[in-house]
Amino acid sequence: MPIKILLVDDNDNNLLSMEVALENAAYRFSRANSGREALRILLHEDDFSLILLDVKMPIMDGYETAELIYQRDKLKHIPIIFITAHDYEEAAMFKGYQAGAVDFIRKPFNAEILRSKVAVFAELYKKNRLLRRQEEKLQVINNDLVQLNHELEQRVLERTLALESMNRDLQALNLSKDKFLSVMSHDLRNPLTALLASAEKLNTDPENLNQRQVKQLSQIIYRTSNKLLNQLNDVIDWAKKQSQKTSFYPEKIPLAQGIEESLELLKANAHQKKIRLQNHTPKDIEVMADTLMLRSIVQNLVTNAIKYTPDGGSIVVNAKRTEQMACIFVEDSGIGMSTDTKERLFRNPDQRSQAGTNNEQGSGLGLFLVSDFVSQHGGQIDVESTIGAGTTVRFTIPAV
Amino acid sequence: MSKKILIVDDDPDILEILSFILADTGYETRALTNGKTIFDDIKNFKPNLVLMDVMLAGMDGRVICENIKANKLTAALPVILISGTHNLSESLHTKGGPDDFVAKPFDLDYLLSKVARQLS
């Protein structure tokens, strides 16, 4: 980058001779014939490294010009060398320093001295410029650091808030688990105790009971059975609410692998009934799913398939990509179900599930949760079944 | 004269079936749904045994049992505690502890044998 020098003198000859004396490839000169013209040039260009300013000029002298130049903040750092007459007095020179001059050169000037002085300021300017650049770089780095620090603090804060919120959720869950346990142990055990005792009395001693006593015992049985049913419904409601509260964090999962992991635990169950459990899911399908929910869906469906498939049957898990979704099938060679059962399947979580082919029992909650999880993914679930031939459950979740 | 049993349980179904069974076995019973008036009931019913649930509405059967055992007038009165949630076998034979313990749900013969043992 050239070093820009502004020469100000009302005499063209002086301007020319300064320029000649300073001739240097690194310098670039601008000329002004008056203080006013110098100010005009400085209005457009403020990147001069030095101003050589004649003191004695008509209309506006060098001091006035310097004063006006230094009124602008952007120009304050440009050094000014005053050019003065040979007989210049010390008092006048002091005035010049007050106006902001860094040096004086007497006319007619000695070319050698002029060159040396200008060279000193040119060098100074270069070094200053370098320093300023370094400072700017440091400033940028510092700003980045401040920004980074701020972002880190923000992330720590967000993470802390998320953890606190998770902690609250867990505490709430724990509380309701405690409540659940207390309900199970006290509210269910009491009516059950009365029910069992009454039934036992009726069962072991019927010939010694009169009509009135039989009636009293059967009333206790009837009343407590109803209580138990109500408690059970409450428990199911509670479980439903828990499942709705379950957090949903979808992420990109290779489907075949996700399904394989889900099947891992069930292989023993299938093996026990000599059922062939196979995963034919194509390796290239990726889905956007909550890992835990996907596992729960697949495990529930495969558990059901095992439950309703007699010994020696087979179960195949497969998948197909449609435009936006992945469609996953769980196909078994089991006992199948009637249209009536099929229609009630996802609707009523209160109903007790039918026992399996080896009299396996279920809570009746499984399919309710499955359909809930599938709809959380924006997917759909349906069932195709033929009695005696088998059942295929299909559900969709978003593909990637 | 038949032996008298005071039954305390906040569940009316349990109270009813216990009263039924014990009465059917030949005991005289009085049923209480809470333990608030138990000392008055002991005084005027004069039971030979107290059969009491641990979880009473707002009260703890174990505390009532301790109070019975701490009172000179009632200390000799046998107490059987019934609980569905607490295992009280360890509190037996401790100071202020019950004379016996039955878990819910209970087998009738088992309960009746425990009752009979305390009354013999």
Image (spheres, coloured by chain):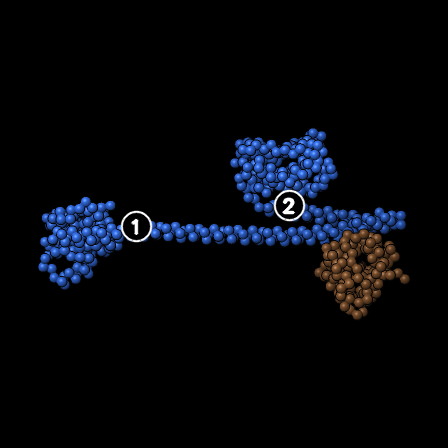
Chain colours: A blue, B brown
Q: Residue at x 47, y 51 (%)?
A: A155
Query: Counting other residues with Cα less than 10 Å from the Cα at mark 2, is it few (<14), some (14-19), or many (20 or more)?
Result: some
Q: What label sits on residue A240 in the rendered view?
A: 2
Q: Which chain letter goes with mark 1? A: A
Q: Residue at x 68, y 34 (%)?
A: A275
Q: Nearer the viewer, mark 1 or mark 2?
A: 1
State whether residue B2 appears in this view: yes
Residue A389 at x, y percent in the picture: 69, 29
Which kind of residue does numbered mark 2 sit on? Lys
Residue matched to label 1: A133
Between residue A269 and residue A238, name the one nearer to us.
Answer: A269
Relative to A371, say whether B34 is above or below.
below
Q: Residue at x 77, y 55 (%)?
A: B103
Between residue A279 and residue A355, name the one nearer to us.
Answer: A279
SS at badge 1: helix
Residue at far right of view? B1
Relative to A240, say whether A97 is above or below.
below
The N terminus of chain A - image quarter: top left
SS at badge 2: helix
